[in-house]
Amino acid sequence: MVNLRRLVPASLLARTNLTLAVSSLMIAIIAIAALNYFVTDPIAERSADDESALLVLSAQTWVELPPEVQLAFELELAQNHDLIINAETQDLIRAELTEPYLDILEERLSERLDTRIEILRGEEEDLVWVNLPMGTCPSVSERAPCVNVQIGFSPTRRGVQPLFVGIIIIGLGAAIVFATSLFIVQRITRPLVQAAERVETFRGGENFEPLPEQGPRELVSLARNFNTMAREISTLLSNRTTLLAGISHDLRTPLTRMRLALELLPEGVDPKLISRFERNLESMDELIGDALRFARGTGETAQEIVLCPYVEEVVRGFDLPIPFQNKGNDTLRVHAAPGALRRVLVNLIVNAQQHGKDVRVMVADREIHVVDSGPGIPREFREKVFQPFFRLDRARSTTTGGSGLGLAIVQQLCQVHGWRVNILEGPSGGTDVRVVV
């Protein structure tokens, strides 16, 4: 079964053109039908009535004229009315009528002469003929002997062409609709595309470029509301980051006092209790450190770096050797916050080392891959693992340690700096975390 939604165009221009095209087509069909019913058909009937009157009058006049004048009358008809009179009747067959006008003309001639009149086909393709009985023939005036006057004329000289009229109306209408919709949609979509680009690049920073508040009233309202929202979000995120950094920094002082107090405990205290306190203090220190690194990373300014050597330098900074492979351009330069990118890579590598094995790093142009051959992450959890303190296995906290903020910080830093991070399945069944700078 065909999905109709897939047939609908995606762009605003295409959808507007389609809507206007359908409506204009319906209007054109109604206009053509009304034109045929109220204008074309009455004109065709009146024209056929006049044409039949002219043919009958010409035949009657030609019959009543003296022979020496008939030739001059024939020339007059040919020059002024495009009618040809044959003095000698030809044996012709009935023509196949393709024009509605000729059908009407047959009816009018038959009504005028009170006998069946047929339009005949001649040797010339551009002429048709009629045999008009004149004189004392049945149902005809008895002023002269019965004579069949054969008159030839062009089959299209007065015929109307509704098909061509319809094509012209629909063709010109479609061109006008397309040009009009293109003009209107461009005026609407240009600021909308600009707004979409600004929304896509907005990451909550204070140095965002506001949308121009100009154009139609609705677009001005949209731009004004977006600029207001962006300023409020930037202020909110800035205050949140400042608060987080301040709290994390201030917690270092009581944490240091607690360490000092732990060192000054008397020797009779249970060593297991002291060890437990030390582990708790280390966990707290790790949480505070992660919060401070995140706060610094969100406010960092981007600068130009050579991506491949930078990533290789970060990988070489680990104590255990990590295989590194470059499949892209060695000299590719990108604009990125180096400290934030280092924190993202370090967190991903540490997470891979804790939960997987055979960790390796690969760079392919603007993509950075951290691959391991561990148990992998099920598809339904690949978004949830970026949430703070989320763990696939609750038992891992006791074996692998960690603050539970590593991947959450990765996602937050990537969102702030406009990078993309997602989790794929590794070649050997493990995990492939891809960061697109």
Image (cartoon, rainbow, N blue to C red):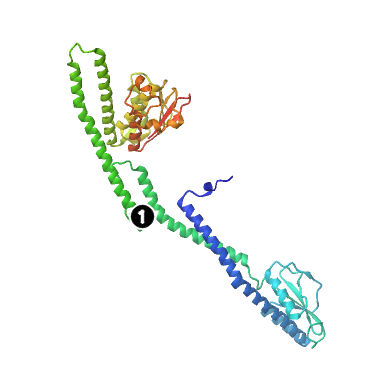
Dividing the picture into quadrants, the one containing residue 356 is top left
Taking the spot 31% from the left edge, 34% from the top edge, the residue there is 337
Closer to the camera in the image, 300 or 356:
356
Residue shown at 63%/70% (left/top)? 160
Name the outermost residue toward the top: 268
Residue under pointer 1: 219
In the rendered image, which quarter is residue 215 located in?
A: bottom left
Image quadrant containing the C terminus: top left
Res 145 quadrant in image: bottom right
Residue drawn 29% across the image and 35% down it: 298
What is the crowding at mark 1: few (fewer than 14 residues within 10 Å), some, or many (at least 20)?
some
Q: Nearer the viewer, residue 143 or 110?
A: 110
Residue 154 makes an appearance in the image:
no
Residue 33: x %, y % from top left:
59, 67
- Can residue 390 be seen from the camera position used here? yes
Residue type at tag 1: Leu
Of helix, strand and loop, which one carries label 1? helix
119 shown above or below 326: below
Instruction: Looking at the picture, tell me which residue is in the foreground, 60 or 434.
Output: 434
Relative horizontal placement of residue 216, taking residue 279 as reference (left or right): right
Q: Is residue 371 above or below residue 5?
A: above
**Of residues 337 and 222, the one drawn nearer to the viewer in this rendering:** 222
Residue 122 percent location from the top left of the image = 76, 70
In the rendered image, the quadrant that contains the N terminus is: top right
Say whether residue 84 is left or right of residue 428.
Answer: right
329 sits left or right of 266 in the view: right
